[in-house]
Amino acid sequence: MPAPTALELLWGTQQRARRGPKPALSLDRIVGEAIALADAEGLANLSMQRLAERLGFTKMSLYRYVPGKAELTALMLDAAIGTPPPPTPGWRAGLQIWANTIFARYSAHPWTIDLTTGQRPVGPNELGWMETALTALDGTGLTGSERLDTIVLLNGHVRSLVEQLAPPNTSDDVYATQLAETMSAVGHLYPAATAAFAEESANGHPGNALQFGIDRILDGLAVLIDRRGLASPA
Amino acid sequence: MPAPTALELLWGTQQRARRGPKPALSLDRIVGEAIALADAEGLANLSMQRLAERLGFTKMSLYRYVPGKAELTALMLDAAIGTPPPPTPGWRAGLQIWANTIFARYSAHPWTIDLTTGQRPVGPNELGWMETALTALDGTGLTGSERLDTIVLLNGHVRSLVEQLAPPNTSDDVYATQLAETMSAVGHLYPAATAAFAEESANGHPGNALQFGIDRILDGLAVLIDRRGLASPA
DNA sequence: GAAATCTGTTTCCGGTGGACACGAATTAGA
DNA sequence: TCTAATTCGTGTCCACCGGAAACAGATTTC
């Protein structure tokens, strides 16, 4: 039996073997527990050993279902992001919902950000999200490249925000305190930063960076679409 | 001797000890070689062991200079991104140069992306880049929060592109081939994606996603600034 | 039944970050 | 000048990591 590749596992083109004992585990159970473990303790604390203990099996038994940890995390990613929301009329409303929904998905499993870096095999759900966003851009007159670049832009903004947000379990303001001390010590060398931080903390600004970025991106996209003059502005 | 914190190391508030043998190594040499090693073989292949071998010392000797690997990578980050470019008149031109320059810095050391994740101590160079971008937004009428959100947006776009770009040393198109095979197999389920990919590969589009995103962001920002009516459009 | 095959386990390996104790080198204070 | 304090680099040790290989028991096909 050749080891299944990540693509085969992602797209589910495998059938049960014929001889030998029936498997006591399943790929779904393994991936599900792995997601739960990563949610609870972070991707850094997800090891084959700890995952196996959680499942009540030995570490090496997992390798009967998954050729390696890389393939496991690929499956975790596609399962965690889930299926995209249904399409919405209007490119602006569609992308707005798309960005907010995928932000919620990423935020529910922050470790997904670490797994969506670089070149990698693409799973059905990840492709589904791309399909949904591209569909939202139908009728805007943008080229295929521009649509792809738009998704990269929007997705990159959402991802970078999830990445910077601290999970509220740990002490989330130890670095805020550090930054405040640093600014009070050497802030005179950074007047613009000092002013911006002061102004931000004066108003009780609770962090609408996500919506701010989405609005700027969609405003800029509207400028381009209007310039093409092929679509009605949203 | 209490171990120096990452902040103390970053901001250089340490003095030579008085007794004992003179150090044969230096923090600068260690950080410099660590950067060279990460550039050559990636952050995943940077271990204290291999770094020490490169320096001709034992692994544990490094811990006399750095309390742990986390502090080392923090120093590597601030050293690798370097100092920001001088300010440029005009918010749009300033941000344009800022984004392109920091993209070049990130690209020269792609591992920096992995280190600029989550809450962490901030070094002088990182704060300098923020200061430069905030200064570029002087006179635009934006609030402090808006300026900070703008930088997050612009920086996030640049970072996400560096993150997705494959370093050209490895086989960069093995996953492109995989994607092509996947699309030919199940592409009928993703018509918009199929069309976009086909249109992109038809035109020899060599990837101007960076400039596309910057233009959209700055266009959207111009809309906001004009709405404020306090600054002359660039 | 016998042979083939799949299961989960055991054992083992090189590599990782780091704690700790040690002898050698250096310098401050008497 | 001599001694005590302190810092240096090293050697040893540990838990943990991802994974290879061989193995015994269960199951199915012939």
Image (cartoon, coloured by chain):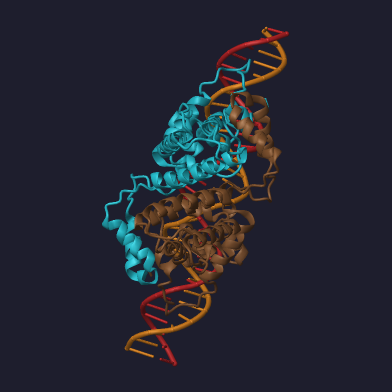
Chain colours: A cyan, B brown, C orange, D red
How many numbered circles does the render carry?
0
For the residue pair A219 and A48, the one nearer the viewer reads as: A219
Q: Is residue B102 above or below residue A49?
A: below
Q: Residue at x 47, y 65 (%)?
A: B125
For the residue pair A190 and B6, the one nearer the viewer reads as: A190
Q: Residue at x 64, y 35 (%)?
A: B197
Residue A56 drawn at (x, y percent): 45, 28
Residue B173 drawn at (x, y percent): 69, 42
* Residue B227, visible in the rendered structure: yes
For the residue pair B96 and A209, the one nearer the viewer reads as: B96
Point out the image quarter for the N terminus of chain A. Answer: top right
In the rendered structure, the answer to whether residue A225 lies left or right of residue A42 reads right
* Residue A175, visible in the rendered structure: no
For the residue pair B64 and B133, the one nearer the viewer reads as: B133
Q: Residue B175 sits in which quadrant?
A: top right
Q: Is residue B159 above or below residue A37?
A: below
Residue A163 drawn at (x, y percent): 44, 47
Residue A137 drawn at (x, y percent): 53, 34
In the rendered structure, the answer to whether residue B88 lies left or right of residue C15 reads left
Please identify the residue farthest to the front as the structure is shown: A229
Point out the image quarter for the C terminus of chain A. Answer: top left
